[in-house]
Image (cartoon, rainbow, N blue to C red):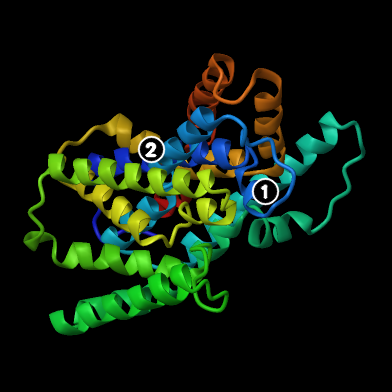
């Protein structure tokens, strides 16, 4: 899946790297502290009896949770050019990692590995929810691209308003499971991709300075963290976790602000462009039940947000990024389409 331009600016490649680091750190918080279980009323190691630590986790997560939306904005800005080779490369890459994980888990648990089609199911139905939605977006992208190119300005704005109502009112506010309850679905991917397409179309009219965009991102992230902590204090854990849903209007605006902050940067760096090709490998390696359970064990052993656990978290991010370098050449085409 090639972009509309042969060479991407390094500013967005850098955003790809930052967004992936954010996703890993976000998962360390949400899965490593079992925050999501707390929202469902299930047993959790989330520090409900330690307000300072809980507050720190929520404010940090408010900054990190923009990663997925940032990827979709980049895809929308450059536009997905659907080709069978791109889809095939993405599918094969995901399957290779899924089978490799199954073999690895069988080895460390000292059990015989039995070949099955379960890894295919894992890619599309379980931890691979992002891949499932992204593949659907790939198939829908030609229609979205065509519409945004041919819409009048008024029609483009009507489309944005319509998708915003579906996402923010029926989805986030009313919680309709049939539309866009959390942002973990194809409609949300279409919505953020559509925003990216409009940012591309009207980029000459957008004159927000980097400092202002970055300030808006920081301000909105702090606001999201504050609202989440407020809900935590009154014991409304489901609404606390709701603030970190991808379809939260404040989170969408925060993601756009971060995107615009990087958009104003202008530089080209071969290493940054090369390194950005690792994002798919990093995502597939870390987003697995094995790693999620490992994150929990780290927090149980060393304590949540202790110096040891924070240090290990940073080491994991670095190791994941540099440890995936050896697969760079094998996944070049697929990685670039992912970002």
From the viewer's perspective, is residue 143 above or below residue 240? below
Return the residue at label 2. 17
| Place of residue 68 in the rendered image (x, y in percent of width and height, measured from the top left) | 43, 52
Local secondary structure at mark 1 = helix
Q: Position of residue 203 (x, y in %)?
A: 13, 60
Quarter location, residue 262: top left
Left or right: where 63 falls relative to 257: right
Q: Residue at x 63, y 21 (%)?
A: 303
Front residue (pair 158, 43): 43
Residue 145, horizontal then vertical, whole percent: 30, 74
Would you place residue 216 above or below residue 162 in this image? above
Mark 1, residue position: 37
Q: Residue furthest front?
A: 234
Q: Is 10 left, or right, of 125 in this rendering?
A: left
**Lateral position of residue 11 relative to residue 83, left or right:** left
Question: Which residue is more in the foreground, 36 or 71?
Answer: 36
Query: Looking at the image, which residue is at 21% across and 78% down?
Result: 157
**Residue 39 can be seen, yes or no:** yes
At 84% from the left and 51% from the top, the residue drawn is: 115
The image quadrant that residue 13 belongs to is top left
């Amino acid at each position: 899946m090639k972009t509309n331009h042969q060479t991407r600016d390094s500013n967005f490649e850098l955003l790809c790297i930052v967004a992936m680091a954010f996703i890993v750190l976000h998962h360390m918080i949400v899965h490593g502290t079992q925050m999501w279980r707390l929202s469902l009323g299930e047993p959790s190691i989330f520090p409900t009896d330690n307000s300072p630590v809980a507050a720190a986790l929520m404010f940090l997560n408010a900054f990190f949770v923009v990663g997925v939306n940032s990827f979709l904005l980049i895809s929308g800005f450059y536009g997905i050019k659907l080709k069978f080779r791109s889809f095939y490369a993405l599918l094969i890459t995901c399957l290779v990692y899924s089978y490799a994980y199954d073999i690895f888990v069988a080895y460390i648990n000292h059990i015989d590995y039995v070949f099955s089609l379960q890894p295919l199911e894992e890619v599309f139905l379980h931890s691979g929810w992002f891949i499932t939605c992204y593949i659907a977006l790939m198939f829908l992208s030609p229609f979205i691209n065509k519409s945004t190119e041919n819409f009048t300005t008024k029609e483009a704005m009507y489309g944005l308003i319509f998708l915003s109502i579906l996402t923010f009112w029926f989805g986030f506010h009313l919680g309709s499971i049939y539309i866009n309850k959390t942002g973990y679905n194809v409609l949300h991917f279409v919505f953020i991709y559509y925003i990216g397409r409009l940012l591309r179309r009207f980029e000459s009219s957008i004159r927000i300075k980097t400092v202002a965009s970055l300030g808006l991102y920081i301000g909105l992230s702090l606001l999201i963290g504050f609202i989440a902590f407020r809900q935590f204090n009154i014991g409304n854990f489901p609404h606390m976790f709701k603030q970190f849903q991808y379809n939260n209007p404040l989170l969408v605006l925060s993601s756009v602000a971060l995107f615009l902050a990087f958009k104003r940067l202008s530089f080209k760096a071969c290493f940054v462009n090369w390194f950005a090709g690792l994002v798919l490998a990093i995502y597939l390696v870390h987003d697995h039940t094995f790693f999620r359970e490992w994150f929990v064990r780290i927090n149980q052993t060393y304590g949540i947000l202790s110096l040891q656990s924070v240090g290990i978290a940073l080491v994991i991010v670095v190791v994941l990024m540099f440890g995936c370098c050896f697969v760079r050449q094998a996944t070049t085409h697929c990685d670039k389409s992912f970002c």
